[in-house]
Image (cartoon, helix red, strand yellow):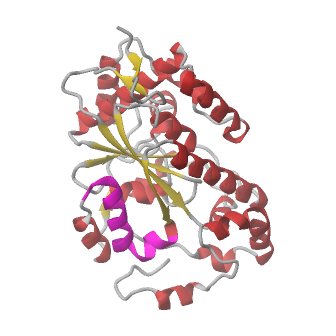
Amino acid sequence: MSPLTTDSQAPNTIRVSHLNHADRPVRVLYVMGAGRSGSTLLDSILANHPDAVGGGELVNLHSAGWSSNEVCACGKLGTECDFWTRVRSAWQRRIPDATVASYIALQKHFEFPHWFGLIQFARLARQRFFPSGAFQTYLRQTAALYQAIVEVSGRSIVVDSSKTPIRAAVLSRIQGLDLRLIHLVRDARAVAWSRRKSLATDQAAGVQTTIKPRPSWYSAGYWALINLLSMLVCLLSGSRSLRLRYEDFVTEPKRELERLGTLCDLDFTATITALLHGDPIRVEHPIAGNRMRMGGSVRLKPDWEWRDRLPTREQVICWLCAGWMLWLFGYSRNRRTAAEDVAMQPANATRPI
């Protein structure tokens, strides 16, 4: 029997045959959106739930963690981290014919974006109705990865903050995954400010390669396209989804975590209590992502730096490039100062940095 068969009752998904009779559908909380939107923070907070494990940017696990041997949040190299070493063994036990190199090659063909993702979306649209053998292999190996993470962690839910909508579209094709999509949005001007900064390579600090600054027009265009594709995935995937604004999450964590709990069928009461008391959230083994993951824990600290430091000219450029979508997401062209934001926050909210 082929490892993948088309489900006649759901022609737009591919059903993964049971790799192990004990396997159950893995619930995946997938965070997508533009980079520098707070996905690492959200990943860590969601993974604080006792039933969840934070994987970080799993899209980069094979290439960064196992091929380039970059550093895990625990401080060890990807090939030396006990958790990811056991995950790799469990993954390859499920699919003996797979290798890290062959999986990366499949990723480059089906998942990594070309021409800002437009070509990849066209390829996935074709695979939706006429799945090739290579695409079926790729889905089988991807499903096995999530099953391996659940097996090793002993938890039933995987948080994946890979961000790319291309991967979300791929995951929506695997019926063996219980996919919940979280479309994370942050003001494009904040993203542009973050991407203007350069960072030198510092592997121990979680900066694996030199990060060069990007001009605001480029960042705003990238932000608009990624969020547009994310909206399309939410609309077309058939998976349960929710749009979450970074600004709402960091100022009203109780309300937003309750919304997320409804989406994910989870009770985040304990996490809410910890956040409102300013307690640190422990970070375990997320791979790749923001360098904040290397500190062992994170705290909910809103960041409004861009409002005071991004030049007005650059803010205007962002609005010209992406203003229509900023307006759609409820952002105002007028900015408030950080001091005004502090005054507007509830008494128990975390103060911004």
Q: Is residue 264 magenta?
A: yes
Image vertical order of residue 264 relative to residue 300, above or below: above
The picture places residue 157, in percent across and down from the top left corner, at: 29, 44
Q: Is residue 23 magenta?
A: no
Residue 57 in view here: yes
| Side (left or right) of 266 relative to 307 | left
Quadrant, the N terminus: top left
Q: Nearer the viewer, residue 341 or 353?
A: 341
The picture places residue 152, in percent across and down from the top left corner, at: 24, 34
Q: Nearer the viewer, residue 199 or 332?
A: 332
In the image, farthest residue toward the top: 1
Instruction: Considering the whole magenta stretch, tell me its main secondary structure.
Output: helix
Residue at left offset 31%, top offset 71%: 275
Q: Which of 297 and 130 is in front in this view?
A: 130
- Find the magenta span and give its range: 247-266
Residue 207 in view here: no
